[in-house]
Image (cartoon, rainbow, N blue to C red):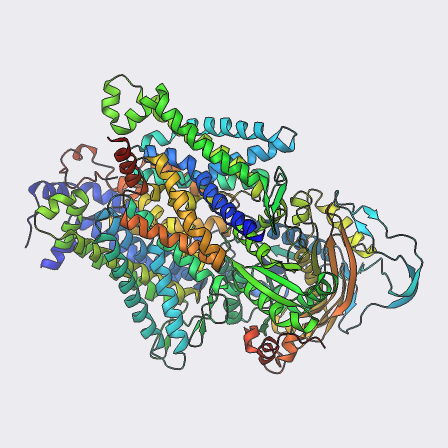
Amino acid sequence: MRLLHLVNGGEDLGRSRWFWIGFAAVILALVALPLYQTEFEASNASYYLLNIPLALGLSMLWGYCGILSFGQVAYFGIAGYAYGVIAGNLTETSWGPLVGSVGGLLLCAAVGAIFGYFVFFGRVQGWIVPILTLVFTLLLETFLGQTAGYQWRIGAVQLGGYNGMTGIPPFQIGNFIFQGYAFYFFALSLTVAVYFISRVLMNAHFGKIMIAIREDVLRTETLGYDVRFYQLGVFVLAAMLAGLSGLLYVQWGNYITPSQVGLLPAALPVIWVAVGGRNRLLAVAIATYLLNWINYTLSEAGNQYAPVIMGALLLLVMLFFPRGIIVAIAELRWPWRRDVTPVSVQDRSA
Amino acid sequence: MATQIPKELETQAESGQAVERRTVVQGIAAAVAATALPKFGVMTRSTALAAESGPVKIGFIEDYSGNLSVYGLQKLHAAQLAIKEINEGKTLKGGPVGAGGLGAEANFAGKPPTIGIEGTGLPVVNDGGPKDHKDVVFAEDEDVLIDSGDKGILGREVQLIAPDGQSNNALWQQLARRLIQQDKVDVLVAGFASAEREAIRPIVDRAKQLYFYTNQYEGGVADANTFCTGPVCEQQVIPGVSYMVEKFGPRGYTIAADYNFGQLTAAWTRAFAPLVGGEIIGEEFIPLSVSEFSTVIARIQQAKPDWVMTLLVGQNQHNYYPQAAAAGLRLPMVSTVNMAQGYEHRRFKPPSLAGMHNAIQYQMEVPTNRNRAFVKRWMAMFPNDQYIGEMAQNTYFTIHLYAKAVRLAGTTDQQQVKKALESGWTIEAPEGAVFLEPGTHHCAHYIRLAVCDENHNVSFPRSWPMIQAWWLQRLGVNLIRHPEYKQYVPDEDPYFAMFLKNKSKKT
Amino acid sequence: MDTLGLLASILYQFGTNAAFLLLAAIGLVVILGMMNIINLAHGELMMMGAYIATIVTHRGIPFPLAVLLAFLLVAMFGAALERVIIRRFYGHELGALVVTWGISLIMGQGTLLFFGPFMPSIGIPGGSFSLGAYSFATYWIVLIGVSAILIAALWWIYQNTRFGLMARATMQKAAMAEALGVNTDRVYMLTFALGSGLAGACGALLAPTVSISPLMGQQFVAPAFITVVVGGAANVLLGAIGSSLLLSAVKTPVGLLFGAFIGTVALLLTALIIIRLMPNGVSFYLQRFTERRVGA
């Protein structure tokens, strides 16, 4: 079965039977979460989970294709606001949220395509791309921040400036509204699905081209691939994944502000991905969940040391586990295997 | 175009199995631990049974770190002081019938006393001269802190649960959820910036949680679960602007933070200035991240106004004051926020805030005896504090008000307490008498005009003993008859359009 | 007389905007432009310099000495950082990025825990002068001059001193320089120290104009990065001058006509377009221009 073969490709952590058993056990634990956690705690877990598609997109973009983007949160915001506007205007109908979700994703894809065209078809390379994406994000934040006036409304929904857009409707299909435990399952299933699709994609032909581009753009081009299209493609894909996270976020919190698109939030996905191990999707997923959980637990405890601890954690991880802590753990037991791993799979780029 | 996996990778994968097994077990353990851990250290569900016994829990979210911590820490101390007093069996004077302060005939000085900036003893720099004017004055009540006859609230101890919002709105939401769903607090007192309030208001409404917002703000919140005890635009903008027009001339220029609060307050100012003989000749909205103001200063100089309305929020924007002073801009200023919240007149060197006016209900320098007693109590508990801002004082009397409402209701059940609060309350706060209006859930305040001179000493040349928050009344908001859960903006009020259309409308 | 005032005002705006960008960027020019370390702690280094200058000035030490002290102390701190942490990340920009972000978190929050949320700032030294209906702060004129002097000083160091020669060699081809006997480790450490010290000094210089709080560094990070990147790597100093002048030339008239917000948007848009159209930055073209003039 080709699909099974693809799922078990080498571009992500874990291929053996034991790995899959462990994986299934974890999924089972997550599914059974409502049995031993309150709705509030499940709601928190939803928050940790919904950031994973964003991180996965960045991992594919950066870890596998070598393009660092600081601007993933921009698409997070675009999708969130789009959903808020569309679903907020269609409150009488029951398919408003569905239309809003689709609309949000499409808008992300469109903006991502335009911006990607602007960047990649000009053959801008190197570390200019992160700066461009960061500037775009700041531009979006500044623009959204000044939409406080009453004239800034689309239909019946006000953009709200720095107060944010409130009262965003939760997701519903038919008459069923996803809240609390229901939303948790929704987020969990979406995240797992996205993970598997990404995993298959990275193990498939598309993923191989990504890695080839990361390793050596010129070589890939001389082999006949139009690098620009592939870069654009993965950029749009990452944008849509970030948008998916944004959609889940507003459906979870019913609120979004321009500060979600600011300088601090822009660096967060980069940190999750770097700490996990940017070229391993599973590592990224685990790191995202854990880092969000740690940050929340620390700050919820009223702990003023939370940012200091996070900073120290980042320092330690990068000093001692530069390839990512999860990846380091996964590769821990066979250091004698390192020299067997072909050079082309090793991550050389910085 | 299938590609073959190189031989080397195959062998690597297979031989890694033994290792993988161990990793996997560790992984499962870690994952289960991760999902289970948050459960520990958090209150169990059995606390729901302890609703009518056990401590009364006040949920309190403010920023103790990050951008807004200078405001958040003041509010925390206010809450701690109020709770200590309640637990010791004290309360503020007041009751569920509205009554203003009493009047008496007395002699007073021609000018108000000027209060200096040195330390917290509120030194009187200039007492205004001989007391040779005779008129009716408001009687001064030294002792507004009286015995409550109760230990705590209804015999139960009051507990403060105060996590740190870290100036991060997403965290605010999580904390609000936790306090409401997990800790099951009896009342939520939270929010400095309007953005923070709006972030948690939907959560509050879904849970029908009793919620107090104790900051001054742009007005308009009509929410059956929310009680706003800070002053709003009609109580601050109109007195302030009318004073400036009278003293300095009709032409005003507004510079405001570019978010809801700044936009809406600027809209208020623009609409109402003509009615008191003024005119806003220009407006500028400044993003919160801007810290460099030479362009703004140049535009103000170009426009040549008589006074400037400053609605600046946050660290970056406060840079305006020293920069304007250094650039030689000596125009008088009026604000509804500065001085009274972030104590800029103590943080910046003179004469940066010279000529700053603010129409506020409270500033630490208020020279009444009851305020001095309050400041003394505060400094006894927190000797290192530098200032007591308006929102800290609001928080203080709000918590006392909550205690009184619970005693009237006889229970901490939130729906009953809301009804008790809607009976119309007067409470004798350090600022003066405050009246909580039943229908609008807002407070009528004692408003004073504070002026800062070039040595940064403060005086209060004018006061308005009671200004109602009448705007929501005009919009027809009566939350007892018709519960609502929204925030009104000036554009929804047809009178604004009417005022804006015609320029000079002095009546 | 007022047209003279207006003209002076526009020139003054232009100068202050450019000086602000330049001062925010100088420290980063050295570290990012020359060492390719994406230093997300740049804002916190400036904050550190501002705090040092403020504390020291409150104790009575004259302001210029305070700036010098800030330079020295932050430079030493930078050297220590480089020794312990940064040197492990040469060639690994992503690692440098995450690590410096972690450092910035620690520095920012640590300052909050240590010094509290606010510190009274020092007044802006000097007075003001007026031309027509406009008045200007003397201090900003001083800052414009100081920023020009700093760039000139950096230029001088890198062109005319032995250290500058070694540093340039190391930047161009480290292996070659090492083979020729240059102690590249020392060069890196000194360069990072220089960059940090400059960031601290600029923070100290800007301290009177801003409010002193633990997160004050954040307002400098974005302008600094944008200025450095628009400047480009061909000639970092020339690029920094060119980009700050260019960006200010866009921001000033737009800001004067339409307001500060639109000015910021215009600056960001310009940066976006320039980076896209001239990926090697402004300095690439400036360099070619000067070389052609000199006949190289």
- Classify residue B359 as left or right of residue C25: right
Question: Residue A33, image x and y in percent?
Answer: 37, 60
| Residue A286 drawn at (x, y percent) | 31, 50
Up-down relation of residue A294 to residue B271 (above or below)? above
| Residue B154 visible in the displayed image | no
At 13% from the left and 59% from the top, the residue drawn is A3
Q: Is residue B404 left or right of residue B220?
A: right
How many marks on residues?
0
Residue for point 64% across, 56% down: B159
Q: Position of residue A171 (x, y in %)?
A: 37, 71
Quarter residue B8 falls in: top left
As rendered, which of C107 and B155 lies closer to the eye?
C107
Which residue occupies 29% across, 29% down? Answer: C171
- Residue B244 lies left or right of residue C194; in this view the side is right
Residue C53 seen by the camera = yes
Of A10 and C153, the residue lying toward us: C153
Q: Quadrant of residue C162?
A: top left
